[in-house]
Structures are given as structure tokens and as C-alpha cells.
Amino acid sequence: MIATGEFAMVIASFCRVGGCFLVLPGLSSARIPGPARIYLTHAVALTIAFARGGDGQPVETASDLLALIFAESLVGLFIGMAARMMMLALSFAGTAIGMVIGFNNLFGQGVEDSESQAALTTLITFSALVLLFQMDFHHAVIRSLHRSYEVFPQCAAPEPNLLLSNITRILSSAFFIVLGLAGPFLVYGLIFNTAIGVLNKLTPQIPIFFVSLPVLSVRGLVLAHLALPEMLLRFVDAFLQLPIL
């Protein structure tokens, strides 16, 4: 016997929590030191293992141990990717908003990724991330990890159909949520560009594009100032109400 039931439960919890924290928004950032993430993973894994009462199945062979690590890491990655897809959808909405109001060419370093990102997109995603942690988003993730053993027991291989159906549901929900949040900016851009196109046809001798660009940017910033606080609050509410499992 490689591991008893109690020790196998600790290993399973560590793999599940580690897989989740590997892609979870905020905790997976390269700005957080690696040892700090490992210590946090250990603490949460031990908490979940003790909360489950050490009710785990013993591991007999090395192949069973490898299957346990693979299955538990896959479940954790699925839970973390559910939250990651919501943040990616918000990042997509921020890119669309910046493109509409003419601020998509101002690039800077992203908050979580090392790749460059539009400054407005970084502002939106970072503000949403701060609000999520202020509203105990990390507690909701830990509760989801604890409840996941009722849906995906230890050593039980996750059903691909269940994972794919949940991923599809989360992706569609995230798309409709951010589409509704970015709707005012898209409508504003459509109306403004249509009006500019009509004016360009009426007065082709005037460079309408250079005249209209400052107006587009200033009005877009005013709209962002008025709409972004409510947009972020609605996104956080929808994020926390979205069932992962």
C-alpha cells in the first residue's frame, strides 16, 4: 500500500486545489511568488482534507497514484478554468470597448499575463478582480472545491460529456453577460460612426475622421466614467451567481 485513506485524501486535495489555483484569476498571476502560492495551496488542501474527515480511498499501486493525480488535477483545472473563462470574456469586452471609443492602441503590461494589453482593458479587468476578492470570491472557490467531491468523488474519472457540457454552458453565459455589459458602448459606436459616415458623404472636402476622433474619444471616456462602475458591479454579481458545478 502506497498511501492510506487519510494520506490519499490529502494528496487528492492538494492536486485538486493546485490544479484550480494554477489557472484561477488573481492567484495564478506571475506577480505572486511561487512559494507563496505553494503555501496557500497546502493550507487550502489540508483544510479541505480535514473538512472531508479524511474519508479517502487508499492507494495500492503506483498506477493508482498516477490515476489519482491526473483525475484530481483535471477536476481542479476545470473549476479554475470556469472562473478564467469569465475573466477572459471580460477582457474581450474591454478590448471591444477600447476599440469603439478609440483607446485600443494605448498598450501596457497586463495585470496577470506578461503579454501587452490595452490600458483600458487592464483597468477594467483589474478593477473587476479587486471587486471579486472584496466580495469573497476566493471563499466561493474554496466552497466549490469542497462541494466538488460530491460531484467528482476521489479517484473517479470525470465524465467528458459532463465537463464539456459545463464548459459550453459557462462560455455561453459569459458571452451573453459581457455582451449585455458592453452593449451601451457598442450602440454608441454604431450611432457615432453612422453619423460620421453620413457627414463624410455630405461634406467630402472636410477631413471628418480627424475632426471626429477627439469627439469620439472624449464622449467615450465620459460614457465609460458613467457606465463602468455599474458595469463592474453587474459583472461581479453575475460572476458570483454563475454555478460552476
Image (tube, helix red, strand yellow):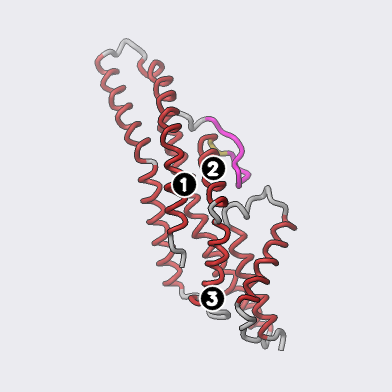
Question: What's the amino acid at mark 1?
Answer: Leu
Task: Find residue 228 and report its horizontal and vertical position in percent.
Answer: 45, 38
Q: In the image, what residue occupies the spot 35% across and 37% down?
A: 184
Question: What's the amino acid at mark 2?
Answer: Ser
Q: Mark 3 points at which residue?
A: 149
Task: Give the SS element for disc 1.
Answer: helix
Question: How many marks on residues?
Answer: 3
Circle 2 packing at 10 Å, graded few (<14), some (14-19), many (20+), is some
Q: Quadrant of residue 43?
A: bottom right
Q: Distance between the residues labelled 3 and 2?
A: 32 Å
Q: In which quarter of the image is the N terminus?
A: bottom right
Instruction: Please report the bounds of the magenta region as a residue range.
Output: 106-116
Between circles 2 and 1, the one closer to the viewer is 2
Q: In the image, what residue occupies the spot 54% across and 67% down?
A: 143
Q: Mark 2 points at which residue?
A: 127
Question: What's the amino acid at mark 3?
Answer: Tyr
- The mark that comes first in sequence, 3 or 2, is 2
Q: Is residue 153 above or below residue 135?
A: below
Q: Mark 1 points at which residue?
A: 90
- The mark that comes first in sequence, 1 or 3, is 1
- The mark that comes first in sequence, 2 or 1, is 1
Task: Give the SS element for disc 3.
Answer: helix
